[in-house]
């Protein structure tokens, strides 16, 4: 048994620093590389890609990331865990396998493919069986938007990833697993933690939560004394050094920028946290109120004392559905009287839309530089040097939104003076993808693990 298991976080979302995975495996010793690609809206984007081309539906950046770390996998034994599979883990695995073969490392690559989270093909069957998939926020049954659903994926836990590792996979690819499971699974696998070892499992979940957003816990996006965070251009991504008893240290490679401190770790801990006593995952419910943090040297924070309890009998389901169309345009008004000019332009634009008889579910105006962040708390900004008027509409009627896009440009000549910032041209109509959170009985979600080599 290893004394320490090192899990390096190399991606916090699809679109994160593409060079971070390579830097993580080359910057010092690590056992596992964890790459988190998925957000709620990402699944619907990937589903639309798969509808256009059945060979797509995964985070294609992952293939390039794997190419950059392939020598570490094949020669040094670093194992990679990622949810880059999106809505098509088998296609993602095949793309990685083909890349490895082309690079001469195919014989040393064993890919564990985890499927079963995608409920879209089973949605009607599940609803007919009594699973209403009510919206967790509104209580509405999914039947009210069923015909507009784009994707439906259950959040799965660490168990199938552990299974893939136990079958010899050195690359594990999942679909919509929880972000935290990507880190907890290798630690659980290495130390053989049982499925009811609640405190240790909770510790693994906390470790995953801390590094799931990449450099956000090592100085990036840090509010506390952000001016003093060194060399963010060379920010070091986080590493968890985990022990068998569930305690772990959060750190980063030496000679990298950023900072790992109690404060940066605290800021990440409260990210996306609801009830601190009940951080619910498929594996365990972690009690964040029991977390103990202490300094362990420069850029090292020790985490211990975490308590956990049995999970619920439900899994969360992330559902995305079509919710109409939107368009957003902007103009910038300069001093003097920038805010008054912006408000006048807003009134003119609304009057013109009303004159045209266009109906919208929502019209939203923001005065960026004045109230777009703090709203009414922003106070009086009569002397603002410049204000960006950002004007958006939403409707189920695409034609109405299209017509709106032709109404902003005329304000340049027939509205208030001192306007600029329209170089981007006419606003583009975009389809709105809305999020529908739901719960489903664990027993109906069956995961499957296959090894591709």
Image: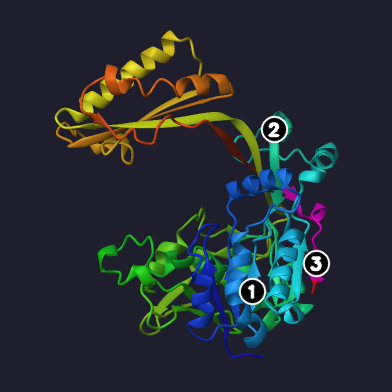
State the residue at coordinates (43%, 64%).
216
> Residue 265 got which mark?
none
Q: Is residue 289 visible?
A: yes
Looking at the image, which is closer to me, 259 or 288?
A: 259
Could you classify mark 2 by the number of other residues whose Cα lies within 10 Å: few (under 14), some (14-19), or many (20 or more)?
some
Q: Position of residue 295 (x, y in %)?
A: 38, 80
State the residue at coordinates (39%, 13%).
352
State the residue at coordinates (33%, 41%).
373
Q: Is residue 414 left or right of residue 5?
A: left
Q: Is residue 378 left or right of residue 64?
A: left
Q: Is residue 304 visible?
A: no
Residue labelled with disc 2:
148
Residue labelled with disc 1:
80
Could you classify mark 3 by the number of other residues whose Cα lies within 10 Å: few (under 14), some (14-19), or many (20 or more)?
many
Residue 449 falls within the magenta-colored stretch:
yes
Q: Are marks 2 and 1 in contact (CB under 8 Å)?
A: no
Q: Position of residue 316 (x, y in %)?
A: 67, 51
Residue 250 falls within the magenta-colored stretch:
no
Q: Is residue 128 left or right of residue 254?
A: right
**Stretch in magenta:** 439-451
- Give the answer, above or below, for where 129 lies relative to 415: below
Looking at the image, which is closer to me, 439 or 171?
A: 171
> Residue 449 got which mark?
3
Displayed quadrant of residue 186: bottom right
């Amino acid at each position: 048994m290893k004394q320490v298991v090192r899990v390096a976080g190399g991606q916090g979302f699809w679109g994160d620093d593409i060079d971070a995975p390579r830097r993580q495996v080359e910057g010092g010793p690590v056992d596992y590389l964890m790459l988190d690609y998925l957000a709620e809206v990402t699944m619907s984007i990937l589903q639309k890609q798969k509808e256009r081309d059945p060979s797509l539906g995964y985070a294609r950046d992952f293939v390039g990331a794997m190419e950059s770390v392939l020598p570490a996998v094949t020669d040094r034994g670093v194992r990679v865990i990622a949810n880059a599979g999106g809505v098509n883990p088998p296609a993602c695995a095949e793309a990685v396998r083909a890349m490895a073969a082309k690079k001469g490392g195919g014989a040393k690559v064993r890919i564990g493919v985890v499927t079963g989270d995608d409920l879209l093909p089973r949605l009607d069957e599940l609803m007919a069986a009594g699973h209403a998939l009510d919206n967790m926020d509104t209580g509405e049954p999914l039947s009210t938007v069923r015909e507009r659903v784009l994707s439906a994926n259950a959040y799965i836990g660490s168990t199938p990833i552990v299974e893939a590792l136990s079958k010899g996979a050195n690359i594990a690819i999942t679909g919509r697993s929880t972000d935290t499971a990507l880190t907890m699974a290798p630690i659980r696998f290495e130390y053989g933690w049982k499925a009811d070892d609640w405190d240790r499992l909770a510790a693994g979940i906390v470790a995953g939560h801390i590094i799931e957003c990449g450099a956000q816990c090592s100085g990036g996006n840090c509010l506390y004394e952000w001016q003093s965070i060194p060399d963010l251009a060379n920010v070091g991504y986080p590493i968890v050094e985990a022990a068998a008893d569930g305690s772990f240290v959060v750190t980063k490679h030496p000679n990298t920028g950023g900072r790992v401190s109690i404060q940066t770790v605290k800021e990440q801990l409260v990210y996306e946290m609801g009830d601190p006593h009940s951080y619910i995952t498929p594996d365990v419910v972690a009690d964040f109120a029991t977390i103990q943090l202490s300094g362990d040297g420069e850029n090292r924070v020790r985490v211990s004392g975490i308590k956990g309890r049995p999970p619920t009998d439900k899994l969360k389901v992330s559902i995305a559905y079509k919710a109409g169309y939107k368009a957003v345009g902007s103009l910038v008004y300069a001093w003097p009287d920038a805010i008054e000019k912006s408000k006048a332009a807003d009134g003119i634009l609304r009057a013109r839309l009303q004159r045209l008889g266009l109906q919208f579910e929502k019209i939203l105006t923001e005065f960026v530089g004045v109230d777009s962040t703090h709203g009414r708390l922003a106070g009086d900004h009569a002397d603002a040097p410049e204000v960006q008027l950002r004007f958006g509409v939403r409707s189920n009627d695409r034609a109405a939104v299209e017509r709106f896009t032709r109404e902003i440009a005329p304000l340049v000549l027939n509205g208030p003076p001192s306007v600029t910032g329209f170089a981007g041209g006419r606003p583009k109509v975009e389809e709105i993808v809305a999020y529908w959170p739901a719960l489903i009985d664990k027993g109906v979600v069956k995961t499957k693990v296959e090894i591709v080599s």
